[in-house]
Amino acid sequence: MKSNHRLWRWLGLIFVLSFGALGFIGYQIYLTAPPIPKAVVSEDGSTIFTGEQVQSGQQAWLSAGGQQLGTVWGHGSYVAPDWSADWLHREALALQAIRTVQQTTSLAPPTAIERAAIAVTLKDEMRRNRYDDASGVITVSKERAQAIRETAKHFETLFSSDPSLHALREQYAMSDGALPQKVDRQSLAAFFFWTAWAAATDRPGESNLSYTSNWPHEPLVGNTMTGSAAMWSMVSIVLLIAGIGAMLWVHGSTKHEADPELPKTDPFLGAVATPSMMATRKYFFAVIGLLMLQIGMGAITAHYAVEGQAFFGIPLGQVLPYVVSRTVHTQVGVFWIATAWLATGLFVAPLLSGAEPKYQKLGVDVLFWALIAIVVGSTATGWLGTLQHMGFDYSFWIGNQGLEHTSMGRIWQILLFVGLLFWLLLLGRALWPALKKPSETRGLIAMVFLSATCIGGFYASSLMWGQKTHYSMVEYWRWWLVHLWVEGFFEVFATAVIALIFTKLGLVRTTSANRAIVAETIVFLFGGILGTLHHLYFTGTPTSVISVGAVFSALEVVPLAMIGLEALQTYRRSQGAPWLAAYKWPIMCFVAVGFWNTLGAGVLGFAINPPASLYYVQGLNMTAAHGHAALFGVYGMLGIGLMLFCLRGLYARHLHADRLLAPAYWGLNIGLGLMVFLSLLPAGIYQAWASVTQGLWYARSPAVIHSGIMETLVWLRVPGDIVFAGGALLLAIYALRLLRRPASQAKAGFAGKPATQN
């Protein structure tokens, strides 16, 4: 018990220190972010862009789809270019052409000496920081001003309906007239220029070190990987190996308790679902529906990578453009996983406490319909806003903010925050009797409640940026939500719930589970909180972000090395009693979580986490491979496993068509594997080679994206997609069969006849 108290104190200390460090680094990002100038002017005194245009341009890009339509500083979608890299390359080529005319003495092609002189001049002009802090003005040469205006014309035309670039829009999966207003397109060009300027311009007092740490790779302007990125990558690899070695040594040297003796009968047999527990059934059917919607939108979105705005020749992009389909695909993925976990909490709380608070069922019902309203409302208004171009204010407050995984309008974010706090209230009042009563499982129950508190509270990070917030700070707060909220506290919550379930089933000793859950949370948060910074290496942040992010993201991977082993041990224990067959597929889902945590989050995650790797692959399909394997393989399978456990207690056991779960399970996992390793990962590796050898602009250009190899790799998603969708369909059929109402149905709950193979 004393050792547990020490672990809890260590947990509190690490929590406070880690968030203190993360907050301090956020303050440093605020102070050192690339400055937004009051104006960009030519040496002849003419104004090219204003600061207001730069800020309005950020809003224009986000309202046109933002991170669902290409990327800025590497974050977003993968069919359209990275606009920062694309602008930088186009401007560099335009300036090179101008300087070539000036610096050559004949009509013949430039000599080697002349080319070298032009390259030196170009690099110096693009990298020299001519921002005046006192006046807030960036001054450029007349020649560069000409190059900027030529480059701006391209992007202004691209985001219009001009037929001259219609073919290019098709390649980018862009709709014609993405920004109908000319003034918005001019502002967009200002924003793209500023992101490219920050990417190539040396920081004050530095040489060959831009505001984005020389990202993207662009040889024309001297953007190459920094020495610190290489050094800290090596440090992270050493730490990873040392950490895994230390964990294996501790695991091997620790005296392990013998496996617990399994109960003779199911401990849950005879438990009857309370009214509020029964009310969670509709949540799980919503989960199935949202999963099917996500799969459908994913198939359409992937297909647009080949046909642009068509789906097998059907002009679907006119009513469902790429921006909308990808927004729904990414947003709904978070929705259904979170819904499964929220419903599990509401189901498990009365089961653990043995108490049904007054009006609990009413609260569960109200919360469900509130969540449905948020999902449907945010999706519909985002779709409408994208199609009708209803302006910046509408996009930010009601429609689509254009930020990946956090795209819903601010009104919907506020409502979801209120809904999560209401969920926390419902969960807390149901768990309170168990928290007050001394028991062996009180520590686990406390962890469930504390992690739930963090889930409710930390969603407030989605409210921390405004319409005109600096883009570096938008990314800082966005990753608080995506990394800490989704990948952090939800995982701690789910892990604690699973530990409770396993202790109740007798698969794990209560004392061991209490100690293990706190220890694992310490290890995870120690690396995970500051590991958030690996998303921010190249977003206009100080160089300290690279060192801290590299070290702690490596430590974040260390505990994942043991998860697969723990999952295997749990599976072996589950074979020890006949009654455990009823829980085979929930347990198998947890085993899959262990597998994908090790492979998807661990191996594929660390493949891109070191700065030296991410420098070349940020914004490429390597990220998509990791994202699919980790998001569905870990969090999705975790949600499905929890759902299957809850459904065992919500419907009489003879209603469960378990024979459908085997092909559903293997279809989902094999389909995911085919999707990742047959298509996404090879595509990412092919792009990585292009990025290393020529630059990021080339890896994201139509020459690569629509090459024969890449389009073939896109088509190779089809086998995996079919197998995966088949598994999801069988899961849906399994759930729908539970709605049968035969006269002989037993009382709802864990009671009932033993599971049968039907």
Image (cartoon, rainbow, N blue to C red):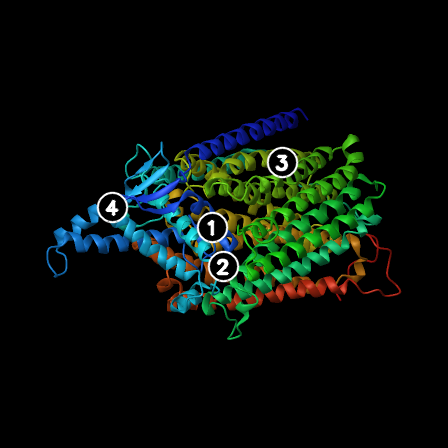
Q: Nearer the viewer, residue 712 or 42?
A: 42
Q: Residues within 10 Å of mark 3 (few under 14, many from 20)?
A: some
Q: Secondary structure at mark 1?
A: helix
> Could you tell whether 315 is left or right of 731 in the image?
left
Give yes or no for contact between labels 2 and 1 (Cβ–Cβ under 8 Å): yes
As drawn, which residue projects farthest toward the front? Answer: 45
As drawn, which residue projects farthest toward the right? Answer: 743
Give yes or no for contact between labels 1 and 4 (Cβ–Cβ under 8 Å): no
Q: Between tags 3 and 1, which lies in front?
A: 1
Q: Is residue 168 above or below residue 485?
A: below
Q: Residues within 10 Å of mark 1 (few under 14, many from 20)?
A: many
Q: Between tags 4 and 2, which lies in front?
A: 4
Q: Which residue is mark 4?
A: 123
* Label number found at residue 676: 2
Mark toward the start of the polypeptide (1 vs 4): 4
Mark toward the start of the polypeptide (4 vs 2): 4
Q: Amino acid at mark 1?
A: Leu
Q: Report the residue at 41% width, 61% height from top.
A: 158
Q: Which residue is mark 1?
A: 604
Mark 2 → mark 1, Cα distance in angstroms: 10 Å
Q: Which residue is mark 3?
A: 516
Q: Amino acid at mark 4?
A: Lys
Mark 3 → mark 1, Cα distance in angstroms: 26 Å
Mark 1 → mark 4, Cα distance in angstroms: 35 Å
Q: Position of residue 675 (x, y in %)?
A: 51, 62
Q: Secondary structure at mark 2?
A: helix
Split into 4 quadrants, where in the image is the C terminus?
A: bottom right
Mark 2 → mark 3, Cα distance in angstroms: 32 Å
